[in-house]
Amino acid sequence: KQEVTQIPAALSVPEGENLVLNCSFTDSAIYNLQWFRQDPGKGLTSLLLIQSSQREQTSGRLNASLDKSSGRSTLYIAASQPGDSATYLCAVEGSQGNLIFGKGTKLSVKP
Amino acid sequence: DADVTQTPRNRITKTGKRIMLECSQTKGHDRMYWYRQDPGLGLRLIYYSFDVKDINKGEISDGYSVSRQAQAKFSLSLESAIPNQTALYFCATSDPSQGKETQYFGPGTRLLVL
């Protein structure tokens, strides 16, 4: 059974700092991996999707990497801003097309 | 206008009541999903549907049922609500024909069962 783990559970950083969020998964046979952002009381917004054949994806200040063989992904956020404060969720696509989520990392960026 | 909408956004009900959560999408996607989110447990899949004639149980389907009335509509029912079904419920859609199976989420329905 696929399990997704995110470390740390919570992170607080000063504005401007570069940071890395970690995601690990137990079964390397994945179709893709997605990173989402969730604001309090809101739905999920897809940030980046990495296909199983890809190593990384970039969007603005965000860069996500994928190492299938080791079961790891990282989300790198450059020059963090208070508006980046949210919970970041990692999810892998299972064999049935559904997503299996980690519990998230709650990020707080302080001005 | 939002591509994936959920109604109601908030609902308080009593134990034993039957309730329905509705999801509509304008993205034209065949695949739709229902998840629930609980503090400390993350999101878990309840049911999913790959097209109007296809319904599948997810990880935690007990106590729930679904109906795919049309491509655009996917409803989740709690036949007899119980307090441990208190959670935030999300509907999502995806379209694998686009080559990238990004899932698009609705805003969520916050359910409280007393």
Image (cartoon, coloured by chain):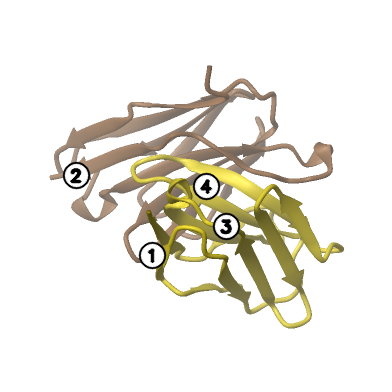
Label 1, label 2: how far apart the Cα atoms are: 18 Å
Tell me which residue sits at (73%, 37%) in the image: B95
| Relative height, residue A80 to residue B98 (above, below) | below
Tell which subunit mark 4 falls on: B
Which residue is at 60% across, 23% downward? Answer: B72
Q: Is residue A70 visible?
A: yes
Specify the amino acid type for callout 3.
Ala
Subunit of label 1: B
Residues under labels 4 and 2: Cα distance? 20 Å
Lower sequence index among marks 4 and 1: 1
Q: Secondary structure at mark 1?
A: loop
Name the amino acid, label 4.
Tyr
Q: Quadrant of residue A35?
A: bottom right
Q: Is residue A81 above or below residue A2?
A: above
Q: Which chain is brown?
A: B
Question: Pointers 1 and 2 in contact (CB under 8 A)?
Answer: no
Horizontal side of residue A5 vs B51, given as left or right: left
Calculate the distance from the C-alpha at mark 3 to the C-alpha at mark 4: 39 Å
Label 3 sits on a secondary structure element that is loop
Residue at the spot of label 4: B47
**Residue topped by disc 3:** A79
Q: To which residue does mark 2 refer?
A: B113
Q: Say yes or no: labels 4 and 2 on the same chain.
A: yes
* Mark 2 crowdedness (10 Å alpha carbons): few <14, some 14-19, many ≥20: some
- Whole-percent x and y of residue B109? 35, 36
The location of residue A63, given as percent across then percent down, is: 70, 59
Q: Which chain is yellow?
A: A
Instruction: Give the chain letter at badge 2.
Output: B
